[in-house]
Amino acid sequence: MHKKRVFSGVQPTGNLHLGNYLGAIKNFVELQNKFECVYCIVDLHAITNRQDPKELKSNVLETVASFVASGLNSEKNIIFNQASVAAHSELAWIFNCVARIGWMNRMTQFKEKAGANKENASVGLMVYPNLMAADILLYKATHVPVGEDQKQHLELTRDIAKKFNNDFNCDNYFPIVEPLISKEIPRVMSLRDGKKKMSKSEDSDMSRINLKDDKDLIEQKIKKAKTDNDSIPSEVNGLKNRDEAINLISIYASINNIKLEQVFKEFGGKNFSTFKSKLSESIIEKICPIGDEMKKLLKDSKYLHDILKKGSKNAGLIAKINLKEIYEIIGLTKFS
């Protein structure tokens, strides 16, 4: 039996927002009390698109700050950046040789990100699901918290693990990873368009709640968040084809750790102006302290660097042992 271990990675995009918190970081904090956890800032994934080198370094530190400010214990969890552990890249190459081209061609996220001009997309963008599989399996993780949009990549990780185990006759060497998916809020959508995922890349800053937004700005953004003219329903069926309403109600449920049914019971039949006021209060109560702590932590870069150094050392110890075994399994030798 494999030891229960969670792995998850977050891209250092900078300007983290409510979607990052509710969709990933909040869950990380809860998981640290149930599992041994490895949390990685995946800077190698980030460079599948061109990055400004100075911004990339800064964004790595901001991501660490967001983890700690949200309640992740750096003494209890392994927190590190991907580029600090070379074994990720080494195992990714091995998985490039295990995975099939047909598998890569089926990845819908590549098609979405590359768009119509996919011939000019980087090779890294196409094969980065293999690097994602390497991130996870390098630590023999048994569970991975993922959003709905990452389920296909996790299925690929499972396929790679099965094929490796079968190809090299090492049954159960890599665990078949299980997804951990939040049922209440799998995706946080834009405040301006309920069909689009909340993202820092959207032009309007009013489309998202940033973790470093202050009280007044949060109130303003929620007040102007798009809704419809109907009142809040008393049951989930009343949300059919109401994307913006679904989004705000789901955010309220998630930020308060309650079921959707409780939201309907509290606000059913009421208008959105009343609801938005309560939603603002809930977001401010949770997000403003995180933003304040992030700003404080970002002034102490040495502290954040020390967290990454310690995390990279601990991650590297696990990775070194497992990669040595993998090399032996497939017949590779390091004469050093």
Image (spheres, rainbow, N blue to C red):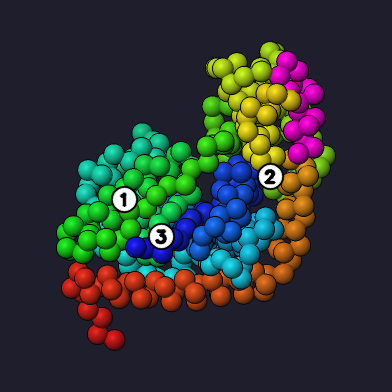
Question: 49 or 244: nearer the eye?
Answer: 244
Question: 304 or 30: nearer the eye?
Answer: 30
Q: Earlier in the sequence, mark 1 or mark 3?
A: 3
Q: Position of residue 268 (x, y in %)?
A: 71, 19
Image mark for residue 158: 1
Tag 2 secondary structure:
loop
Q: Quadrant of the N terminus?
A: bottom left
Mark 2 highlights which residue? 210
Q: Is residue 63 visible in the rendered structure shown here?
A: no
Q: Which amino acid, by three-letter code, is at mark 3?
A: Ala
Label 1 environment density (alpha carbons within 10 Å; few <14, some 14–19, many ≥20): some
To which quarter of the image does residue 264 belong? Answer: top right
Q: Quadrant of the C terminus?
A: bottom left
What is the C-alpha distance between the residues marked 1 and 3? 11 Å
Q: Earlier in the sequence, mark 3 or mark 2?
A: 3
Q: Which amino acid, by three-letter code, is at mark 2?
A: Asn
Mark 3 highlights which residue? 141
Label 3 environment density (alpha carbons within 10 Å; few <14, some 14–19, many ≥20): many
Looking at the rendering, the stretch of residues picked out in magenta corresponds to 267-282
